[in-house]
Image (cartoon, rainbow, N blue to C red):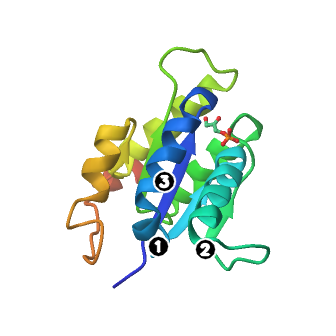
Amino acid sequence: MKKKTIALVAHDNRKEDLIEWVEWNYQILTEHKMICTGTTGKLVEKAIMKKLALEGDHGLDITKLKSGPLGGDQQLGALICDGKVDVLIFLWDPMQPQPHDVDVKALLRISVLYNLPIANNRATADYLISSPLFDGHEYEPVVKDYSSYINRMG
Ligand SMILES: O=C(CO)COP(=O)(O)O
């Protein structure tokens, strides 16, 4: 089975939700690579370590980017442009304005542009993680052909 790279991101008011979801799904998640924005990553790592009763140098495949408002969303967007992310679980907060709203919008836009499977709420995250395409299958999203746009002369 080819490991997928799962990006996990949650705004502060949605972190509890994401961690609960991670606790439900840690067995599947730990079969893949995880990449998170900074604070989310620390919480995800802590939750999985607790589930697996791990300590210290745990060997989990989890990358922590910068915190979202400090550029983590943009780092993740760049990885998506480079085809380095397979799935994005991004529980964003619909009830609170974010100081980095433009970065959030950019991350969502780039995810749609590259036809990335994205979940912005737990129900969709449940559907994604239980899809046969999530575990055990290769899946290459079809990306629209932008060559005429790339080759335009202005
Ligand atoms: O703000 C975020 C996404 O927009 C999440 O960042 P943190 O995981 O660092 O809290």
Q: Amino acid at mark 2?
A: Asp
Which label number is shown at residue 32? 1
Counting from the top left corner in percent of width and height, residue 143 is at 30, 56
Quadrant of the image occupied by residue 97:
top right
Q: Name the residue carrying label 2.
A: 61
**Residues at marks 3 and 2 touching, judged by CB atoms closer than 8 Å:** no
Q: Amino acid at mark 3?
A: Val
Where's the N terminus, which quadrant?
bottom left
Q: Earlier in the sequence, mark 3 or mark 2?
A: 3
At label 1, which amino acid type do we have?
A: His
Residue drawn at 44 percent across, 36 percent down: 109
How far apart are the alpha carbons under marks 1 and 2? 7 Å
Earlier-in-chain disc, 3 versus 1? 3
Q: Tell which of 89 and 101 is nearer to you.
A: 89
Position of residue 37 relative to residue 136, above or below, is: above
Q: Mark 2 vs ligand 1: CB under 8 Å?
A: no
Element on which disc 1 rests: loop
